[in-house]
Structure formats: structure tokens, C-alpha cells
Image (cartoon, rainbow, N blue to C red):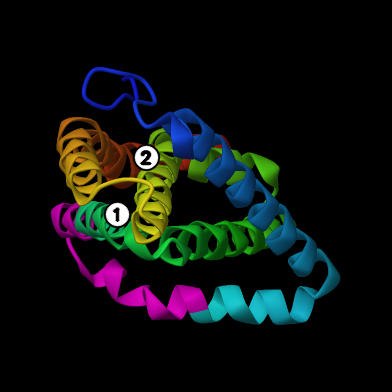
Amino acid sequence: MQLNSSGEYGKYGGYGTHGKYVAAITLIFVASLIAGYGYAVMNPTESARFVEELSAEFGWLMDLSLLQIFLVIFLNNAIKALLAIIFGLLIVVPVGFVAYNGWIIGIVICEEARTSGYMSVVAGILPHGIIELPMIIVSAALGTRLGMMAFLRMKGTISSKDIISEIKWSVRFYLRWILPLLFIAALIETFITPVIRHIVCG
């Protein structure tokens, strides 16, 4: 998988290569995750209540079949990743999306580690997260880059044709790489992660 545009890595160098945006979004995600974890450490009662409410919100998933759960997970991630790209023209959307999700994951990790231990955290996140999280980050990075392009278009630095070209390339990249990998991640999360977690945690 290579991030390039029209066959050239970072074709529009004036507003940075794709790799720079991936790095920036990754830093935002990690910082938000650490912040969420820190919040949970400092506010155990509030974070426990938050995770409990979060679990209750998605409790209806337990009434679904494994196939239905897989479809919900896949469609949820696929739609969010696509929206992060498309609404990236507003810049704040993909950045806020990644920051908020990083914060939530940080809280959940802290609570899971507190109640079940870190092995449970690793077993419950790593199998599918190693694919899913990078795809969400890349989607947000592509969206952020589009947002920067929209800003430069308003300044007259680039043309509308450049933006349209980048949108087409981003959608093709989404269909070729992000969507299939999210499909695989959803399969792992539904059918493999629970088994691994049961084996590791008993």
C-alpha cells in the first residue's frame, strides 16, 4: 500500500505529502488516547460510568447474530472512514473524529486494564485494531489533506481541478485499500478476537 497521487508521491508538495498528514493524524490520535487514559486514571468514578453508559448504548448488539454483528461493525467503520475523507474539506471533521475516538479508546483501555488486566486489553484490541486503527487514521489524513487543499483553493493557490483530482484519487484509494482492509478487520473483530480473548483471559 503506497500513498501517492496520480503516480507521484506528494504531487502537490505545497501543502505536504500524504505521509506528513498520516504522521500528524497519528500524533493527534496518540495524544488523545493518552489524554483519555490520563482522564480515566484521575477520574475513576466518572470514567467507569462513561464506559458503563457506552456499553449500555451498544448492548443491543448482543441480541444480534455473529453475521449481523459483523455487518454492523463493518458498515459503521466503512461509513465513518468515508465520511472522514469527504467531510475533510472542513478540516476540523477528520481531526475531531480521530481526537474524540482516541480519547474514548484511552478511557476504555484504562477501565479494561483496571478491571481485567492489560492482557485483556491487548487480546481485545490488537487482533483487529492493528488493521482497523491505521485505516481510520489514513482516512482522516486523506480528509485533512483535502481540507488543506480547500483552504488553499480559497486563497487561489491551487485550482478546483486539483481538488477534484485529489477527491477522485482518495475515493479510489478508499475502495482499493481502506474498504477491503476494514472488511478483514471486521471479520477478525467478530470471529477471531473473541476467541483469542477467551484463550488469553479464560
Residue 147 visible from this viewpoint: yes
Residue at image point 19% right, 36% down: 169
Residue at image point 43% right, 44% down: 141
Which residue is more in the foreground, 139 or 193? Answer: 139
Q: Give x and y (percent) for residue 4.
A: 31, 24
User: Which SS class for mark 2?
Assistant: helix
> CB of mark 2 within 8 Å of CB of mark 1?
yes
The amino acid marked with disc number 1 is: Asn
Relative to 121, residue 80 above or below: below
Which residue is more in the foreground, 163 or 30? Answer: 163
Relative to 148, residue 119 above or below: above
Split into 4 quadrants, where in the image is the C terminus? top right
Magenta region includes residue 14 = no
In-image side of 176 versus 202 (left or right): left
Which residue is more in the foreground, 11 or 188? Answer: 11
Residue at the spot of label 2: 135
User: Which SS class for mark 1?
Assistant: helix
- The label on residue 77 is 1
Residue at image point 70% right, 48% down: 117
In-image side of 150 versus 43 (left or right): left
> How crowded is the residue under tag 2: few (<14 C-alpha within 10 Å), some, or many (20+)?
many
Residue 130 visible from this viewpoint: no
The span picked out in magenta is: 54-72
Relative to 39, residue 186 above or below: above
Q: Give x and y (percent) for residue 3.
A: 34, 25
Relative to 170, residue 2 above or below: above
Q: Residue 32 lies in what quarter of the image? A: bottom right
The amino acid marked with disc number 2 is: Met
